[in-house]
Structures are given as structure tokens and as C-alpha cells.
Image: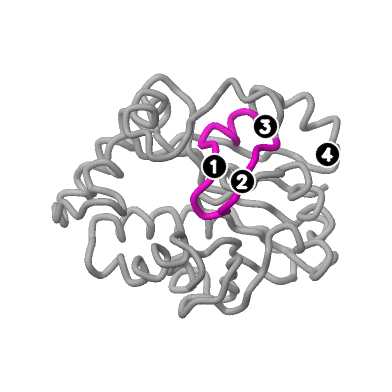
Amino acid sequence: MSNKGEIITEDRIGFEKSNKALGFLYNEWYEIISKSLSEIDGIDIELGCGASFIDQIIKSIKKTDVFLNSNTDFKLDAMDIGKKFEQKISNLILVNVFHHISDPELFLKSAEKSLLAGGRIIMIEPSNNFWSRFIYKLIGHEPFNTRQLEWKFESKDPLLDSNQALSWIIFERDYVKFKNLFPNFYLIHKRNIMPFSYLLSGGHSFNTRIGRLIKIARIFERLFFDKYFGMFNLICLEKI
């Protein structure tokens, strides 16, 4: 393997079996995504799949990444989606991938070209609220820079370089700019989820082995905390 990011990805494949709490949370993400899918007849693709097991929930999906590994259906650079699948895609799925895309305007243009009318981009991304800002900056393993002026940023490794605030910058702070550049995209919904449970699971860094307790945590989160303190956003865009 050519770089550190590829090694990390290969090592994570099957994480849902060793860290059952984290697997439960990803399963919830996949279920939420499945309920947001466009019903337009086309191809469903996950970009930057990494160690994803989304195909257990969405049977029709093709899992892709910027390099081949044992978990991909085929290799695909996100920037090439419009060229290779022009007006063929019904759903593009990105789970914690968008903030790694160093030229999001170019990507969105390519994605728009790939989508059928009524097709959707569905993302799970870091959110920006008081709690999430505190946690992301405290942990600090990836930048969370709300002051980034331009959407584009320098990247040497698409798996490791990022700005976790990118989706907030584009779909909230610079939403008017986004609409001017992409009038054919409609933001269907953007909502917060999971303020504490991802931390309780240990994420990909540490297996806390809390098992079924994660289900109890999610019940309380959904009732009282998701809306205002969620560390992640579900973002759904539709091509008009």
C-alpha cells in the first residue's frame, strides 16, 4: 500500500464486529441514509467507502474509493464521477468524506453532472455547534477551521487531510454563494445527530467495549440532545 491512509483503511475493515457499539452507530447512519434515498431509477454509489458496510443495509449500492482494497467494488475518484457516470446516478452517499474533498466546488459540479433529475447527495458530516466545536477542537486529530475563507484547501492525502467545518462553511455560512453556484441543488434537510454516543463508543481510535449500553445512550440523545448538540449532520441535497 502506498500511504498511511490506505493502511489505516485496510486495518479498519470489519470494525463493526470488534467494536459493536461503533458498528451500531454506523448502522443507524446507514438506516437514516436509506430513508432519505431518492427513488429515481439509477445507480447508487458510495464515495470514499473506506471500511463501510452500508451494502448490508442498501443492497443496490456500489462501494467505491480512491484506491482499491478488499472492501471496494471499484476504484473511483470523486472528481471523476460526472465524467464517468453522466446523468446515471440516483444517489451519491458520503459518510464523513465530504470534509476531505479539497476542491468541493469542483466535486459538486462533477456530482451535479452525474445525477439524474431528482437524484440526491446524502452525507453524514461533522456539525458546527457549541458542543461539537469544543469536542472537535479538543480532540484535534483533524482541523476544524470555521475561518477558512475559500472552500478549496491544500491536500496531499485525501484520506488524512481535511477541514471538518467544510460542510458548515458551504451549506450554512456560505449558503447564498452555494445557491448562486448551484441553483439546481435543493437542500432538503440538514439536521444534527449523536452528541455523545460516538465518543462513548471510542470511535475508530479506541474500543470502549460498552456494547448494548450504546442503545440506551441513543434513546436519551434522540429525545433530548440530538437537535441542538449533535456532533454530526445528516445533509441531503436533491438535483432539481
Give the mark nearest the N terminus, 4 or 2.
2
Q: Is residue 120 toward the left or the right of residue 113 in the image? A: left
Q: Amino acid at mark 2?
A: Ser
Identify the secondary structure beneath mark 4: loop
Residue at the spot of label 3: 170
Report how far apart the C-alphas of labels 4 and 3 lie in the structure: 11 Å
What percent of the width, then of the height, locates residue 19?
Answer: 23, 61
Identify the secondary structure beneath mark 3: helix
What predominant SS class does the magenta segment belong to? loop
Q: Is residue 92 toward the left or the right of residue 234 in the image? A: right
- Is there a contact, CB below 8 Å, between mark 4 and mark 2? no
What span is colored magenta in the figure? 152-171
Depth check, mark 3 against mark 1: the one in front is 1
- Is there a contact, CB below 8 Å, between mark 4 and mark 1? no
What percent of the width, then of the height, locates residue 127?
Answer: 48, 33
Depth check, mark 4 against mark 3: the one in front is 3
Report how far apart the C-alphas of labels 4 and 2 lie in the structure: 24 Å
Give the mark nearest the N terminus, 4 or 1.
1
Depth check, mark 2 against mark 3: the one in front is 2
Identify the secondary structure beneath mark 1: loop
* Residue 204 against residue 219 in the figure, above or below: below
- Determine which of the numbered discs, if any, sits on residue 155 in the image: 2
Residue at the spot of label 4: 182
Determine the residue positioned at 23% across, 62% down: 20
Report how far apart the C-alphas of labels 4 and 1 lie in the structure: 23 Å
- Is there a contact, CB below 8 Å, between mark 4 and mark 3? no
Depth check, mark 4 against mark 1: the one in front is 1
* Residue 140 against residue 76 in the figure, above or below: above
Residue at the spot of label 1: 162
Q: Amino acid at mark 4?
A: Phe
What percent of the width, then of the height, locates residue 183?
Answer: 85, 37
